[in-house]
Image (cartoon, rainbow, N blue to C red):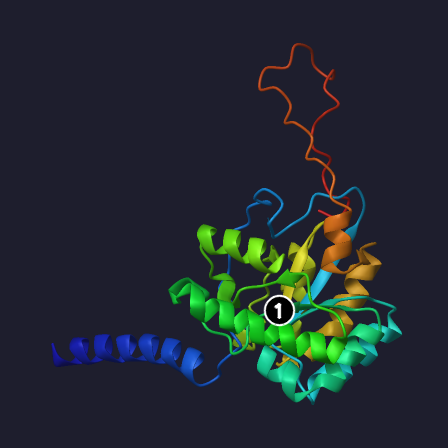
Amino acid sequence: MFRVHFLIFCFVAFATGALKGDDAVSGPTREKPKPAANADSGITFDWIHVDGPYVAMTFDDGPSSKLTPKLLDLLAAHHIKATFFLIGENAAEYPELVAREMREGHEVGNHSWSHPNFGKMSDEGVRSQLRRTDDAIRSAAGNRPTLMRPPYGSISARQKKWINQEFGYKIVLWDVDPLDWRRPGPNAVCNRIVKNTRAGSIILAHDIHPGTIDAMPCVLNQLEAKGFKFVTVSELIGMQTPIPPKPSATPKSAGASTTAPSPTPHD
Ligand SMILES: [Zn+2]
């Protein structure tokens, strides 16, 4: 009996400890998986319907003085433009890296000042997080960002609305999540991304984990081999086309329907 209780205790301690440790110790590293749902009235995006094999790579929580330069070198070698969702604290500490991201044609977005959970915060707290980061990015990059990604993907419908109205931000989530913050190793990160990416995907990764950076040569090579082309999130949103209506459940004649949603060429 004692043994069973002890085992249960260990499990609970491990589970809660792991969660607390992840939030409290490693800080801005963790994103919860989000179910995919398409844009809500032009404000929120996690996948874009596009005609063509276009995808957006996104990197959160940087810049990192050690890893971001390495990633930028790799992206430049591949002539790939990506989108960086920056932590304000890091942008303020490494403005030269923000400037380099912009100079090399990448896009930068607001990912809060210190990575709190917006869903549990007052409007005033959220406003301050966004404002300080907006200021840090503007002073480093010369321009205000137009995109925002909430830490952990945590944000209410009401928050989306007022943030969009007040800051003009589009809210960007994702549809491909390799869970790289758990540091599963470069091979797992690469395989998860390559397996789940489709035309219009917004791919989540973090340029603060060495294994994520080590996975990127594999990711970029394999996605390129499958014919995908990389654009920034704003470019991808700009390519959005309407989703064709679903074919009728009872087609009048076989073979008559040509309106079925075209599968991505890489499924
Ligand atoms: Zn984050």
Residue 212 appears in the figure:
no
Residue 102: x and y, percent? 79, 73
Residue reaching furthest left?
1
Q: Quadrant of residue 230?
A: bottom right
For the N terminus, the image quarter is: bottom left
Query: What residue lies at 78% left-to-right and 69% top-to-bottom?
Result: 106
Viewer-proximal residue among 23 and 164: 164
Q: Quadrant of residue 56?
A: bottom right
Residue 132: x and y, percent? 57, 76
User: In the visual, does 126 lie left or right of 101?
Assistant: left
Identify the residue under disc 1.
Answer: 110
Residue 73: x and y, percent? 82, 80
User: In the visual, does 78 lie left or right of 146?
Assistant: right
Q: How many marks?
A: 1
Viewer-proximal residue among 267 and 31: 31
**Disc 1 element:** strand
Label 1 beta carbon within 8 A of ligand 1: no
| 247 vs 210: above or below | above
| 186 vs 164: above or below | below
Q: Quadrant of residue 215?
A: bottom right
Query: What residue lies at 59% left-to-right and 15% top-to-bottom?
Result: 250
Query: What residue lies at 69% left-to-right and 89% top-to-bottom?
Result: 65
| 59 vs 255: above or below | below
Question: Which amino acid type corresponds to the residue marked 1 in the rendered image?
Answer: Asn
Query: What residue lies at 69% left-to-right and 87% top-to-bottom?
Result: 94
Residue 104: x and y, percent? 84, 74
Residue 235 appears in the figure:
yes
